[in-house]
Image (spheres, helix red, strand yellow):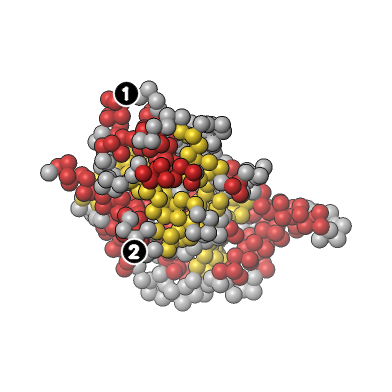
Amino acid sequence: MAKFIFITGGVVSGLGKGITAASLGRLIKSRGYRVTALKFDPYLNVDPGTMSPIQHGEVFVTEDGGECDLDVGHYERFMDVNMGKGNNVTTGKIYSSVIAKERRGDYLGGTVQVIPHVTNEIKANIRRVAEDSGADVVLVEIGGTVGDIEGQPFLEAIRQFKNEVPSKDDVLFVHVTLVPYIDASGELKTKPTQHSVRELRSIGIQPDVIVCRSDREIPKELREKIALFCDVPPEAVIPNIDLDSLYLVPLALEEEGLGHIVCQRLGLADRSPDLTEWRGLVDRALRPEKEVDIALVGKYVALEDAYLSVVESLHHAGIHHNTRVHIHWVDSERLENGSSAQALEALLGQVDGILVPGGFGYRGVEGKINAVRFARERKVPFFGICLGLQSVVIEVARHLLGLPKANSTEFVMDCKDPVIDLMAEQKEITHLGGTMRLGAYPCKLKPGSKAHAAYGQELVHERHRHRFEVNNAYLKQLEAAGLKAVGIWPEGNLVEVMELEDHPWFVGVQYHPEFKSRPNRPHPLFRDFIKAALEYRESKQA
């Protein structure tokens, strides 16, 4: 039977429970155990698919088409394990399932209540992930903070869960909390942690390990104080201070003994961890030999987490090339029609590459199109993702095909030249949630293309999240203008990859390659994009 680690958080949100869970997963995997993770989110949305990226951050897409919380991306990148729809469960999913069962009569006419019906459904999801994955250890992160009303059913469920497993050694509780520094008094304060643990204990959960987030070193005497007041051994109070790189966190937690303690408490053999590869990538990340400047032209730059996987993919590619990637965040609305040549030059003129990521809605799109034109005319390495590719098609149609009204039907339903149009299977859809083209699909690449050279193979599988596509009625015209379709979905003859001729590196993809990049294995397109940006930078300096 699997072992279970439940990760809760207290005091404030944003303490890095997801990174803690992902890092711990890496430490356990490095000891030769199979791991997976499950994120519970206490909001009533069925999934984050219809939520604003400005509010929630990016929506991470799994191989099987799940629209998930961004923490699932952390799990995949750190553990190097593919997750699925079942690895992110919301209150909305739980209640939808319970209500469906009630309507079918599954509860035999009984009164449906939070306890036991909702909590049973939560526990069933935990067991399902364990069974489906075949993992030795399942990490379960409870979103939100202890004390939140919406999170109470999940906390009650995991309290019950501990009493239902065969052995007390099968479950471990890890509580992530804050140890703040008060500048006025020049002191670190343990009281928020004490109160948070007290809140957790009041509902029947005693943490086995406390991970203390802080912006500085936590002295031994303070750790001992936390241990005394929170009833945990001193060695189980694990500091997690701010670091220069996310990828340092597993190594720091290992040095503090977290891997050893977890194995000891779960009755697992504490094998010597193999972190050689991980140490190597961290060393390259911290000691780059080169640097490169990339403009990320997006519409959600007010919250950088909206493009989290894109950012991490750029850094993965940088690590591969021993290069520090400086990301310049450019709000695409600042590049809208009416922007002067001087404004474009000021925002884009000094960078070595331009990346236009995905998005929805018309706001900022004209700015993305202007960024595409700048990269095309100035021969700056360019990478367009999803809406980025669609912006390329619109720009080329307007300025090389002489179709000034070219647009997407997403933005102008009755536009004269709909070079981007709604996918056929999307036209009868009325519900927005979970209805896009989602998950992994095959793409056949044209030999001799930059994409084929990057992947080193003809058939690849990439993850999608979109409703609109390149209109094949304009494909011959686009290709005659030099914008070549070099990647096709064979089953539906849909354009997946396009490249511009007579340009050092200009690639647009309909899918989202950022979801498959790993720190130890960067995505081929991001890798080659950064390579092209480095070559461009060298050419400017020559």
Give the labeled residue for mark 1. 340
Choose top left, top right, bottom left or bottom right for residue 107. Answer: bottom right
Give the labeled residue for mark 2. 456
Q: Is residue 179 visible?
A: no
Q: Which secondary structure, mark 2?
A: loop
Which residue is rendered at x = 49% and y = 34% of the image?
A: 417
Q: Nearer the viewer, residue 368 or 252?
A: 368
Residue 279 is situated, as x and y percent measured from the top left of the image, at: 31, 63
Residue 168 is situated, as x and y percent measured from the top left of the image, at: 60, 71
Which residue is rendered at x = 26% and y = 50% of the image?
A: 532
Q: Nearer the viewer, residue 61 or 207?
A: 61
| Amino acid at dot 2 | Gly
Image position of 48 with respect to 106: above or below? above
Does residue 122 appear left or right of residue 214 in this picture? right
Furthest toward the left, the residue is: 542
Disc with the residue nearer the chain's start (1 vs 2): 1
Choose top left, top right, bottom left or bottom right for residue 173. Answer: bottom right
Query: Total number of numbered labels?
Result: 2
Q: Which quadrant of the figure contains the C terminus?
A: top left
Report crowding for label 1: few under 14, some 14 to 19, many 20 or more residues within 10 A (C-alpha).
few
Image position of 298 with respect to 162: above or below? above
Task: Determine whether label 1 and label 2 are within 8 Å by CB.
Answer: no
Q: Which quadrant of the figure contains the N terminus?
A: bottom right
